[in-house]
Image (cartoon, helix red, strand yellow):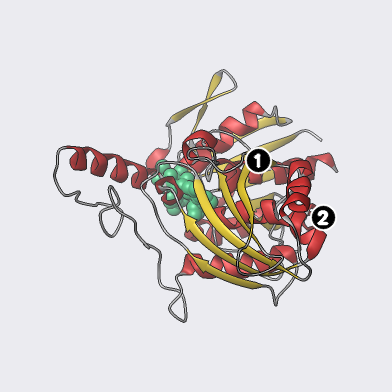
Amino acid sequence: MSCTVAVVGATGLVGRAMLRILEERAFPAERVRALASPRSVGTRLPFRGAELEVEEACDANFEGVHIALFSAGAGPSRSLAPAAAARGAVVIDNSSAWRMDDAVPLVVPEVNPEAAHVRPRGIIANPNCSTIQMVVALKPLHDLATIEHIVVSTYQAASGKGQDAVADLEAQLRTLARGERPVPTVFPGPLAGNLLCDWKAGAEDYSEEELKMVNETRKILGDASLGVSPTTVRVPVVTGHSESVFVRFARPLGAPEAKDALRRAPGVTLLDEPYAPGRHPQPIDCAGRDDVFVGRVREDLAVKGALNLWIVSDNLRKGAALNAVQIAELLVAR
Ligand SMILES: NC(=O)c1ccc[n+]([C@@H]2O[C@H](COP(=O)([O-])OP(=O)(O)OC[C@H]3O[C@@H](n4cnc5c(N)ncnc54)[C@H](OP(=O)(O)O)[C@@H]3O)[C@@H](O)[C@H]2O)c1
């Protein structure tokens, strides 16, 4: 099937990554349209050796679009995605707007690809970046031994909050290098030389970001009672989210069996080095790459049969744009 694809939010960090990935993977689109807010109309974006001229993201511009990749935030997704779907487009949405809607599948192609084909609203949701990399790494272990409880702490990059957040971190790093205290413009406090828990409040003293990890992991793995205990933290890294994950299973799972499954898992690169300083997945190496990198697979010292892992991936690629393009590939493969 050859089709017309619209990228909504094409001028943003995720939208630009979507255009790069559509091009890299030679996605079979006859036409690609770049849409954004009225502020960006007329901006030119490089694509397939030429340029796309940015058009306004409005209802009429979804006419004739087969697949609409949205990454413009939850507000535009709520207002524009139904209009795009009503015109016949399948919407693949990166925002949090539709993820927990029962009539919207939440899809990670390595984990639950079949869900993409049941979409009563014509909308498919892309999970939160931290959830995607965690479930890609944990699915092969879940298949082996059934996960009962996950304890996850995240170390999330500034680019997860968009391009203004990256500019803020870069300015803060320059200020810090001059020996002055950084003055934040996007983050609620200094991030350079610091760590933040900068998400909106959720419920019961958890942040929204933490509750996304709980609810989205349960929805994707199809287990509403799965235990997920999250702490989400922003770190002064530009791109690449990292996660420290403890997992307890229904039966004991040893590190050799887990590593064997991870070695064969789609979308996973196992870095199977014995412990030595510096020999582990790192955001600086994983940025710009497609896989989820898993290392430091250890049997827990206190809980028999449980494991500890270190999981790193590029939040703009597998955490957002690549996952969305892979979902689009599932659609055109049918
Ligand atoms: N960054 C990540 O790692 C990540 C991961 C997963 C999901 N996401 C989600 O992806 C979305 C975009 O993130 P980002 O990091 O790319 O943000 P960003 O760099 O700030 O870009 C935002 C994009 O949305 C567009 N936009 C904003 N308001 C709009 C409106 N009213 N109508 C149409 N377009 C509008 C902007 O267009 P203008 O340039 O015209 O303002 C820009 O193209 C968010 O929903 C975010 O939660 C991000």
Left or right? Give the position of 286 relative to 254: left
Residue type, label 1: Asp
Name the foreground residue: 15 vs 44: 15
Left or right? Give the position of 23 relative to 328: left
Mark 2 and ligand 1: say if the CB distance to the nearest ligand atom is below 8 Å.
Answer: no
Q: How many marks?
A: 2
Q: Quadrant of residue 237?
A: top left
Q: CA distance from mark 1 to mark 2?
A: 31 Å
Q: Is residue 321 above or below residue 46?
A: below
The residue lying at 63 percent from left, 27 percent from top is 23
Q: Which residue is mark 1?
A: 272
The residue lying at 70 percent from left, 42 percent from top is 267
Quadrant of image for the C terminus = top right
The residue lying at 14 percent from left, 42 percent from top is 179
Say which mark, if any, is on residue 114.
2
Name the foreground residue: 327 vs 37: 327
